[in-house]
Amino acid sequence: MFGATAWGVIWYPYRIMQEAGVSGVASSFYTYLIAAVLGGMLFARHWRGLKDLPPSAYWLALVAGWTNLSYVLAVIDGEVMRVMLLFYLSPLWTLILAHFWLKEKIGWHGVIVMAVSLTGAFIMLWQPGNSLPIPHNEAEWLALSAGIGFALTNVITRKSTHLSLRVKSMAVWLGVIGMSIVMMPLEHLPFPGPAFFTLTNWLVMGLIALLLMAATFLVQYGITQIQASRAAVIFLFELVVAAIASYYLANEVMTWNEWVGGLLIVASAVYAASQE
């Protein structure tokens, strides 16, 4: 519940940073750098194992890095609920990836999940005058790619049961830092140095970093204590938090087709979780 709440509101401090003239890439770089430094201090006695990391740890860093960065960029520039719902198409992509990569069969339960989630996406993305129900802007394409990346992260994690919580956490944080560095040349805003930030900016970024760390650890602990299907349904609480927060903090209101499409996407996610 804490992780779902954290991810449901974390977009707001990132928007505060953008209003202060700091792009999403730059704020992601600094917030995840703070998280990685604090995590490195916590895990200091485990550093000697770095040279023995398996290739799956690096693949996890690459995919999770893009997933988290694209998610942050999407919620900064896009409508929060549309971004979240596009992200929550991830059970659909997980089914497809698990079928082709892990050789898991897609039974009729999987077909239902695919049909309902795609129908929801079709209704949500459809607009009068547009022939194709596809994402309408860069933020929505980023959200879609984040959902695919999250599904790929899940599949990699499923194959990498030998990786510890420490390795997974550091892989995600370092992956976002690396991906932010790659994206820096593509940014329109100049990349700010540490001297650019005020004390308030550092406090906001420190708060984001602590939220990221707490969410990572508590979610990982939580999913080891309860059934995966139960955890997946609890994570959907993020949508409730995001809907309330976006309404009161950003004055964003969903249209009827977004409500209908969103309910179908959530229903497919719940059904997919119930079949785990």
Image (cartoon, rainbow, N blue to C red):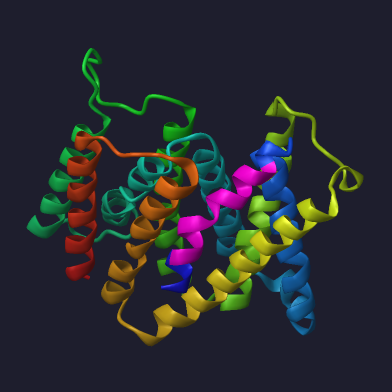
Q: Is residue 266 left or right of residue 75?
A: left
Residue at left offset 73%, top offset 39%: 20
Q: Main secondary structure of the magenta part?
A: helix
Q: Which quadrant of the rendered structure holds the N terminus?
A: bottom left
19 versus 43 height, above or below: above
Q: Which residues are magenta?
A: 5-17
Relative image position of residue 109 (x, y in whole percent): 11, 59
Relative image position of residue 71 (x, y in whole percent): 51, 46
Relative image position of residue 159 (x, y in whole percent): 43, 67
247 versus 173 height, above or below: above
Closer to the camera, 244 or 70? 244
- Residue furthest bottom in the image: 225
Residue 127 lies in the magenta-colored region = no
Residue at left offset 73%, top offset 65%: 36
Residue at left offset 44%, top offset 53%: 245
Could you tell me if residue 213 is visible in this image? yes
Residue at left offset 68%, top offset 63%: 207
Q: Quadrant of residue 45?
A: bottom right
Q: Quadrant of residue 118?
A: top left
Q: Is residue 202 left or right of residue 186?
A: right
Relative image position of residue 17 (x, y in whole percent): 69, 44
Q: Quadrant of residue 254?
A: top left
6 versus 77 height, above or below: below
Q: Which quadrant of the rendered structure holds the C terminus?
A: bottom left
